[in-house]
Image (cartoon, helix red, strand yellow):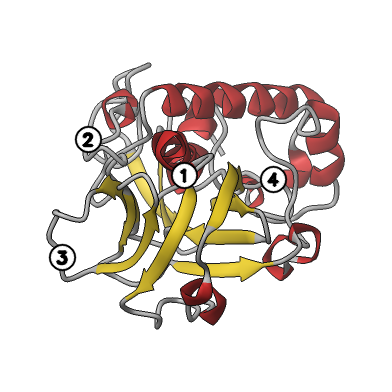
Amino acid sequence: MPELPEVETAKNGITPYLEGYLIEKIIVRQPKLRWEVSPQLAQISQQKITALSRRAKYLIIHTEQGYIIGHLGMSGSVRIVSARDPVDKHDHLDIVMNNGKIMRYNDPRRFGTWLWSANLDEFHLFLKLGPEPLSDEFNAEYLFKKSRKKQTPVKNFLMDNSVVVGVGNIYANETLFMCGLHPEKITAKLTKAQCALLVEKIKQELKRAIEQGGTTLKDFLQPDGRPGYFAQELQIYGKKGAPCPNCGTKIESLVVAQRNSYFCPKCQKK
């Protein structure tokens, strides 16, 4: 699944081709995605795109009259094409611009969506989201306060979007390894120092991933068709049985919150 760095990479890649230009039309080939594509999108014409932004794992296209909000789901990607490029089987939506460019959305598993909102402050999917991990609001004091009385595993805690947004499975695994924390450690037992280290490493890891264009494990591609190169930097995710880069112990895995979790039993004692 594309996580925060991949969505940020997608936003950065398409912005030069969309921002400041007019939408001529939006072509919806397959409206039945995870949530049905908002019918308002097919009615948009001659609206200027004023900015692009991201909230959690949502891509936001700002227009003069409202907001187009996209989620890439499990296998979605956006790329910039021209009218000459053939349409593939899983190309479900095109945003056709007046500069000859098209933002094309491809999603084989159809777990993504494209929605419309006139007011972001009232958009229902954003109402209960926690702070952005790269913001000043996400700090050691905040995380320690949130962790009190939480009897859930720390990995669940980090992936809870009401606590902090965008820390998905890959980056939760990597961060816990760097902090020497077992994924099943009870959240309430985190110390202030451990919370401070978690915040530091989450910010560090997400920034590094964004700089490298995200992580490509299977489906994700940057808007220009290149893979994300951060997969080469992963220390522990997906490496069950490989030696720990710190101590050489074999990496193990278990399922936490229905997701595969990877850890070193020596470096990340429970």
Q: Which residue is the extreme one toward the top?
A: 246
Disc 3 from disc 1: Cα separation: 22 Å
Disc 4 from disc 3: Cα separation: 36 Å
- Nearer-N-terminus badge (1/2): 1
Task: Quickly name the residue at label 1.
Answer: 7
* Left or right placement of residue 170 versus residue 4 in this view: left
At 55% from the left and 21% from the top, the residue drawn is 204
Q: Which is in the foreground here, disc 4 or disc 3? A: 3
The kind of residue tagged 2 is Arg
Q: Report the front residue among 145 and 2.
A: 2
Task: Quickly name the residue at label 3.
Answer: 88
* Element class at badge 4: loop
Image quadrant holding the C terminus, namely: top right
Quarter where residue 86 is shown: bottom left
The kind of residue tagged 3 is Asp
At 56% from the left and 60% from the top, the residue drawn is 69
At 28% from the left and 28% from the top, the residue drawn is 229
User: Percent x, y for residue 38?
Assistant: 54, 77
- Residue 226's tag is 2
At 52% from the left and 69% from the top, the residue drawn is 44
Disc 4 from disc 1: Cα separation: 16 Å
* Element class at badge 2: loop
Disc 1 from disc 2: Cα separation: 14 Å
User: Percent x, y for residue 72?
Assistant: 42, 58
Disc 3 from disc 2: Cα separation: 18 Å
* Left or right placement of residue 22 versus residue 190 in this view: left
The kind of residue tagged 1 is Val
